[in-house]
Amino acid sequence: MLFSSSIFIFAYIPAVLFIYFALLRNIKIKNIFLVIVSLLFYAWGEPKFIFIMLLSIIFNYLFGVLADKYRDDKLKAKIIIGLMVVFNLTILFIFKYLMFAVSSINQLASTNLSVPEISLPIGISFFTFQAISYVIDVYRKNGEVQKNPLNVALYISFFPQLIAGPIVRYETIAEQIKSRRESWDDFSKGVCRFIIGMGKKVLLANSFAIFADKAFNSNLSNLSIIMAWLGIISYAFQIYYDFSGYSDMAIGLGKMFGFHFNENFNYPYISKSVSEFWRRWHISLGSWFRDYVYIPLGGSRVKNKSRLIFNLFVVWLLTGVWHGANWTFIVWGLYYFILLTAEKLFGFEHKFKNFALIKWMYTFFSVLIGWVLFRSNDINSAFTYIKSMFGLNGNALTDRFIPSNFEGTVVFFIAAVIFCAPVSSYIKNLVRKYNLENSFLYSTFYILFFIAIYAVSLSYIVKGTYNPFIYFNF
């Protein structure tokens, strides 16, 4: 079930909110209710996968209890943590990577092994990482162990962040599970955040998806240079507004129920280095790998550069693999490993401070090349697309189809460029500076703005416009 679907907007969330706030009072009953509706939410599309979710909940609840009990016995604790990691990654491997692994073996070793047909459970990468976070945070005393398995179920399955994040760390909401206070202020801010996210997803991401798909589904070697560049820029906007919009909706929904999730995006396309880009993009995933992989390996506080390079290699290889079972994602992860290693070794971020525009151009260009790898079906297609971007396939500069394809997207391009920058933060600062928050004019505009975004987004949803969701694949 998509947040940007009619069934969610008109049936699921109104019913959940009504029952939660009108009929329930006790926090324990509310938690049980949220577990039930979250499992129903997950089972909506593929009911059979609910058993994978329940298996993850039960075993990680037990691992959490054992990790808490034997925390002071280092040997037993390491065995428990090791078994927990093996259990979770085995499930992830079977459902997400087994088909890819067998196919790769057949190609590389010229074997003829039977490739199993395994459907991918939605959001398995996200809820698996949250499950791992729960046990490790309990072991590290970053959150109290849950004696009640239903609370573990709530943490892992809570529907706002279940299928596409953000990856919520257990330490972030451990206290909120057992004691939180909903308020009208939080609820209203949550609704506004949800509307902004819906606008990003429905109005911007879905519009760019049409243009990006036309470019990538064409004969890539015959793409005109301008069409190739417009296609990858469209995809860059699509994936940003798709994923950040979903994160906004998740954060907004969480706030309605009294949960406060950490931010997942911070205007990544204004970055002036690739390192800065990855501090601003998919923050929850980056911080997860930092705290559970990079720092345990030694991080950047190591004695020699070779160890630093190794640590970065492991993190970015895993980051690529996490995103999908395809060589394109592995190469994409290694591509960022090379860029980030070079920036760290040469201290790029601290140099050329007077060349901010050039640094931004280098960063955005690097990110666009990365998105070609990310979006392409295979490595050959990615390199063919990149060659078309620079006219190396003997392709023309432009073609007659661009005006008709691009015509309906110009307004969205302008909006996408504007909202990639912290315009809203700038406006909020001006409002505070001139004390306009309580003025009639500002209040009226504020209300009408959100009504307009909501109404237009709903009209697109009702019309059944193109509504893909990139991160369902992960």
Image (cartoon, rainbow, N blue to C red):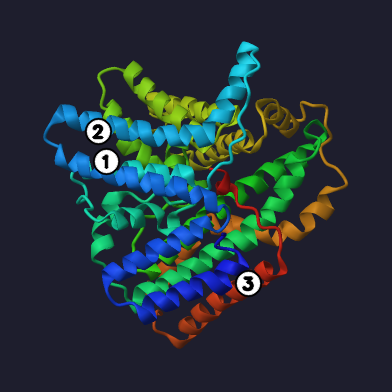
Residue at the extreme right:
400
State how far apart marks 2 and 3 are (Cα): 48 Å
Quick check: can you spot residue 349? no
Residue 402 pos. (x, y %): 82, 48
Comparing 441 with 468, the one in front is 468
Residue 99 pos. (x, y %): 58, 29
Q: Which residue is mark 3?
A: 458
Left of 324 or right of it: where is 382? right
Q: Which is closer to the viewer, label 1 or label 3?
A: 1
Looking at the image, tell me whether mark 1 or mark 3 is earlier in sequence order: 1
Left of 151 or right of it: where is 452? right
Q: Which residue is mark 2?
A: 80
State the residue at coordinates (57%, 74%).
10
State how far apart marks 1 and 2 are (Cα): 7 Å
Looking at the image, tell me whether mark 2 or mark 3 is earlier in sequence order: 2
Identify whether 365 is placed above or below 346. below
Q: Amino acid at mark 1?
A: Phe
Identify whether 13 is placed above or below 421. below
Residue 352 pos. (x, y %): 44, 34
Residue at the extreme left:
72
CB under 8 Å between callouts 1 and 2? yes
Residue 382 pos. (x, y %): 67, 30
**Within 10 Å of the Cα at label 3, are there few (<14), some (14-19), or many (20+) other Cα atoms?**
many
Q: Amino acid at mark 3?
A: Leu
Quadrant of image for the N terminus? bottom right
Q: Which residue is mark 1?
A: 63
Looking at the image, tell me whether mark 1 or mark 2 is earlier in sequence order: 1
